[in-house]
Amino acid sequence: MRETETITLEINGRRREIAAPPNQTLLETLREHGYFEVKSGCEKGDCGACAVLVDGEAVDSCLTLTGTLEGRAITTVAGLKRGEELHPLQAAFVKLGSIQCGYCTPGLIMAAQSLLNETPDPGEEDIRLALSGNLCRCTGYTKVFDAVQEAAQVLREEESGL
Amino acid sequence: MTETESWANVNLRQVGRPLARTDAPGKAAGKTRYAGDYTMPNMLHAKVLRSPEASALLRRIDVSKARALPGVACVLTAADLPDRKASTDIPGQTGKKKLATDQQVLVKERVRYHGEPLALVAAETQAIAEQAAELIDFELEPLPGVYDPFKAMRPGAPVVTAPDNVVGEHKVRKGDIEKGFAEADEIIENTFRTQFIEHAFLEPEVGLAWIDENDVINIRVATQVIEHFRPIAEAVGVPHNKVRILGALVGGGFGGKEDVTVEIYLALLAQATGRPVRLAYTREDSMFGHGKRHPFVITHRTGFTKDGRITAVKVTITADSGAYVFLSPYVLLYATVAAPGPYRVDNVHVDAVAAATNNMFTSAFRGFGAAQACVAHEAQMDEAAKALGIDRMELRRRNFIRTGDKLVTGHPIESAVWADECMTKAWEALGERTPDAGPVKTGRGVATYQQSYGRITWLHDTSEAWVGVEVDGSVVVRSGVTDIGAGQVSALGQIAAELLGVGLDDVTIYNSDSAVTPLAGTTTATRGLYMTGNAVRLAAEAIRGRFLARAAREFGVEPGEVDLAESKAFVTDRPDKSMAFKALVALCASEGVHRSELVMFRAPFTGQIDPETGQGRVHPDYAYGAQAVEVAVDTETGEVTVLKSVGAHDVGQAINPDAVAGQIEGGAAMGQGYALSEELCYEEGRLTTPSFSEYLIPTAMDVPRYQSIILESRSGLGPFGAKGIGEPALTPVAPAIANAVADAIGVRVFDLPITPEKIVMALRRAEAAE
C-alpha cells in the first residue's frame, strides 16, 4: 500500500492540509477531522446521506477517495451557513417542517444546492431527479420539495436584487 | 393540582400552531450531534462477527489469530462470557411464566438465525477491528432448520424455541360466531400474506460506551428506549444503577430501535478493556442487527347481510416470529384486537399464533400488528362491497364502530370515532379522477383503521417529567423521552410554553438521559405525546396554578381571572392590568414559591384479558382515520404509479400541525413501500437483500405530493384532547393502495408487496379464467 499523502483541500472556505491514506474516502476524512455533519448511511452510494459539494457539485463522499481531490473545494452543510444566518435552503427546511429525524437532511440540502447551482429555477421533475439519490424515510419528500422550491425562489430574488 | 381551573383558563396560543421545531435549526445547520458523532480519547472501535448460517451448531471458534493482530485490544466469544444472556421476553408478555427464550449474547452452541453474533472485537481502529473479525476461525455444522411458521408448528419440526416453537397465542371469543354466520347472506373468505420488511432508518445503530469513576457503564446510543439500562445491567451482571443510557436525537426508529441493539456488546467490551468503545453498524450490520416486521398469513372470513351489515368475523393469524421471541406476542395481540377493523362486530372469533423459525427475528415496527390486520380487513370490505353491489364507502359507513360500542375485546370505545369523517374528507380530496390511458388503468382505493395509542394497559405504563422556571423566566423541561425524529421533544416544549405563557424559544428541553432526566418510558406505541405530553402538562399546570395565585394577589383579583401569555401575567378582561412574566417569577422566587414540579402520569392500569376469550381492556384508547389513493397501473408491465395519496386522521388535538402532517406524509411513503416495493428476502433463512440497492424504499422519483388532512375531535386521552399519529399514519396506506390496484385492474393481488410480476400474473390468471 502506498504511503499516506498530504492533500490540500479547501473545506467550507478554509484551506486545510490533510494527511489521508490512499484508500480513505472523503466521508472518512471529513468525519475524522470533525465534520460530523457529514452522515454515514450505507457507505455504498445507495442513500446519499453523506453527500457534500465538490466544486459546487454534489457527490457521495463515501464513494470519493480523498486522494483524488487535491486542490478541490469541499462544502458540507455546515459550510452553507452565512455567518450566524441559515442559508435559504436551510431556513426553508426549518420553516416548512421538512426535517424530521434530520439524518438525511445534510445530504438532501447539498443535493438541492448542487441542483440550484446549475438550475436556479427548477421544475418539480428537476427537483425529484436531483434528490433521487438521497433516501429519506421520515418525510415522504413532500415538504422537502416544498422547501427546495421556496429556497430557489428566495435565492433568485437575492440574485435579481444584486 | 389545579387541573380543572387552569384548563378553563387556557386559550390555546402555542399548541395547535405550526411552529418551527426546536430541533430543526441544529439539524439544518449540521450542528446536531447524533450518537455516532461522539468520540472519546483512547477510544476503541468494535466489530461484531456474525453467523453466515441460519441454523447450525458452532463446533469450534478460534480467536487466537485475531487476538494476536497488532492493535487488537479484545476479542470476546461465548467462552469468555458463558452466562451472559439477553432477555427477549418481557415478564407478563407471554403469560404468567416467562418463556425460556433468552438469547445468548454470543452464540455458545446453537445458531438460530443468519447474522446471529458469534464474537466481538475491539481494536485501535475500525480497519483493524474488521481485519481481526476476518481472522476469527470458526466451524459451523449446519442443522436442519425451519423457515415457515406453519411447518414450524408441525410435529417433528426442528425446534427453535422449546417445546413446540409456539411463542405467542391469542384468542377472541365474542358473541356467537355460528349464529353470526347463519345470519349472513354473503360470506367472503380470503387469505392474505404480508412480507418481512425493514425499518430502513437512515442512521444505522451506533453507540459509545465508557466506564466512569463510579464504575457506572455509560452508553451513548441511538435508541428509542433509554430504560433498557435495566436489561443491559442484568445481561452484564451489574446493578441497575450502574448502567446509564444517554440518548441523542435519533436518526429514525420506527420500532427498529425499540429493542436493545449495540448496548450489551458495548458494555461487555468496555468492561473487558476498561477503555471507551464505539460500535457503529454498517448498513449491512443493521439489516442483520434488529428485528423486522412480522410476515403474517391472515385468513379472514366475514359474514354480511344483503344490506351490508357485518354479522360475523372469523380470523386466523399466523405470524413468523423468527428465531427469538422479542415482541412477537405483543405484536400478535395488537393484530388480534385490530382484526375486525374499525367496525362494530358482535360475533367475533380470532385465533392468532406466532411461531419461531430460523428466519430473522421479528419485533416492533410502526403499526405493530394492526398494520398487517388492516391489510386484511380493508381488502375484505372492498371484496364484500363488490359482491354485495354496495358502494365501498357506504358499506364501511354502515358498519363503523361508534363511541360507546364495544370493541372486539368487549371494552367500550370511549373517545370519538371519526373514521367516517376522515374517510369522506380523504376521498373528496382526491378530486377529479385521472382517466385511463390505453393499457394504463387508473384505480382508487380507501382504507380505514383502528390503531391503539399508548401501551397495553396491564403493563401499567407511566411517564415522568419535570418542569421548572428559572429566576429569569426561562423554562426548563426535563424528561427521559427519546426523540426519534417526529418532534417528540419540541411538542413537549410547546405544551410547557402554552401553559406558562412564554415562547417556544424560552423553553430548553433536556431529554434522554437515564441518570438525570426523569424516566418517561419508551418512544414506542404512539405513546410519547399521550404519556409524556400529559406529564409535562400536569407539571406545567401545577407551576401555572401557583403563579396565577400569586399574580392574582398582586392584581387584587381571583386566580381564575388571571392568564399567562406573551411572557406576561394579566387580568383576562383587563389586559392593561399586567406584569412581565419575568417579574412575576422573580417575585415568586423571592418568596419561595415552588417554581418546579416533578409529575408522574399514569395510564389506565388493568389486569390481563381473559386468555380464553380475549375479553377485557387492552389499550387506553384508539385512533381512527383513513387513507385514500389513486393509482395508475400499466396492465402490460404491471408497473404501479401512485398518483394521489391523502391521509386524513383524527389526532384529537394537533400540538404542532406541521409535525402531524410530516407524520402523515412519511407514513404515506412508508406504507407505499410496504404495498409495492419493499421485501426482505430470506432463502432458507439467509438474507439475500442486505442493502438499499436490493431493498427498495420509495425515492423522490416514486412518490406523489402527499396530502394530509388533520381532524381534531379533542376527545383523546393526551394533552388538550390529543390522540396520536405516529403509527396511525402508516396503518391504512398499504391496504388503500392494494384496494386501488384492485380497482384499477379488476383483480386482486392478495400478497404484499404488489410487484409488477404479481400484477401481470394476476391479470393472466383472470384472462385464462375467462
Image (cartoon, grey):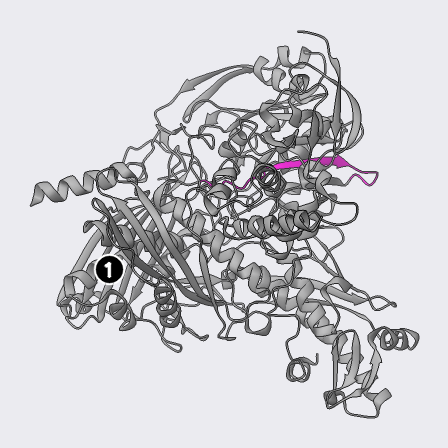
Q: Is residue B204 magenta?
A: yes
Write down the chain letter for disc 1: B
Question: Is B473 rendered above or below residue B683?
Answer: below
In the rendered view, does B26 fall on the left or right side of B111?
right
**Left or right: B705 as drawn, with respect to B605:** left
Q: Position of residue B406 (x, y in %)?
A: 36, 73
Q: Quadrant of residue B646?
A: bottom left
Q: Nearer the viewer, residue B333 or B572?
A: B572
Q: Residue furthest left?
A: B770
Query: Which residue position holds label 1?
Result: B382
Crowding at dot 1, Cα within 10 Å, few <14 / some 14-19 / many 20+, comes out as many
Outermost residue on the right side: it is B590
Question: Which residue lies at the image location 38% right of the left edge and 29% below the top edge?
Answer: B685
Looking at the image, which residue is at 75% across and 62% down?
B505
Please indicate, yes or no, whether residue B512 appears anywhere in the rendered image. Answer: no
Q: Quadrant of the N terminus of chain B?
A: bottom right
Q: What secondary structure do most residues of the magenta stretch adopt? A: loop
Q: Magenta stretch containing residue B617, yes or no?
A: no
**B254 or A162, which lies in front?**
A162
For the point 67% across and 66% down, which residue is it?
B494
Badge 1 amino acid: Asp
Q: Is residue B273 above or below residue B712?
A: above
Looking at the picture, does residue B41 appear above or below residue B741?
Answer: above
Q: Quadrant location of the C terminus of chain B?
A: top left
Q: Position of residue B629 (x, y in %)?
A: 35, 56
Depth check: give the residue in front, A86 or B471: A86
Q: Magenta segment, which residues?
A: B198-215
Residue B354 position, x and y percent, is 37, 46
Residue name at image x 52 percent, y 63 percent: B724
